[in-house]
Amino acid sequence: MRQISMQGIGLGALLLLGASTAHAVVYLDQIDRLEAINAAMLDYQPVAVPGPRPKGMIELGVEVDPVPKIDNTIGAKYEPVNPPPAGGKLRVDWSPLSGVRLGAYWIPPVTVQGIMAQMLGVESEYGWKRNAYVGSLRLFGTQGTVTGPFSAPGAQDQFQVSGAGMDARLGWVNNAWTWYGGLGDGWNSTRFKMSLDGAIIDGQRSYRYGFVGVGWNRGAWSFVAEQHRTEDYLNHISFGASYGF
């Protein structure tokens, strides 16, 4: 459901003066698309190979998500917003039992190119291994706020997101390499506050995603690359490195 303030209603009236009703619908659809893209990039789907970890193992990791090219067109206007080239997360995982992994990630509140994110995510996973095959089932959730110039250069808009999801992964281990893929379902709730006119747009959506990845182990170190695809609006790659002890 979308909730729009009085200022937002005024903005909508101005849009209708210069455009058809269909154009106004496109305007809202495009905003919803941008919300969906940003929410999907912030949902917590940890970059890691599937399979069990030894009991008591702790993993410390870092993830890097290059920001793909995003169409920032709203209505008939293209906003030349300049996002950071990449986002990053710090991650910690703990295995209280063999095959069970609990984890969390944190995006430090650092401003990059005018955009600052404050995010926290959690996950739980059960992993297994049989011969050269590994697999896992995961649950995850995320919540946070991103502030920056999303609607126009120099604006201080606020984007709030909370979400949850689950996925299944299956992989094949060949010496130090693990090749894997997976499918999942997610849900998120967003609120977009435009600073220039005070408009507030809420959104709720469910989505499906898929991914393929490859991991390489060297001693206690693990390096991973994953290619993600979310519905028809987001296609991006993520990288991760972790140290287990």
Image: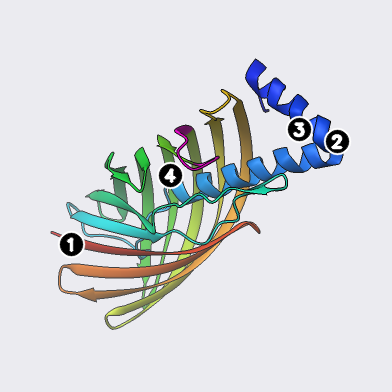
Q: Earlier in the sequence, mark 4 or mark 1?
A: 4
- Tell me the mark number nearer the camera, choosing from 3 and 4: 3
| Residue at the spot of label 2 | 21
Give the percent coordinates (x, y) of residue 189. 56, 34
The answer to whether 23 appears left or right of 5 in the picture is right
Label at residue 140: 4
Judge the density around disc 1: few (<14), some (14-19), many (≥20) Cα neighbours within 10 Å. Answer: some
Queried whether the magenta region covers residue 152, the answer comes back as yes
| Cα gap from disc 2 to disc 1, whole angstroms | 55 Å
Distance from label 3 to label 2 (Cα)? 9 Å
- Helix or strand or loop: what does disc 3 sit on? helix
Left or right: where 162 falls relative to 32? left
Residue that label 1 marks: 243
Q: Which mark identifies residue 15?
A: 3
Are the residues flagged by discs 2 and 1 in contact, CB closer than 8 Å?
Answer: no
Which badge, 3 or 2, comes first in the chain's sequence? 3
Q: Main secondary structure of the magenta part?
A: loop
What kind of residue is marked 4? Phe
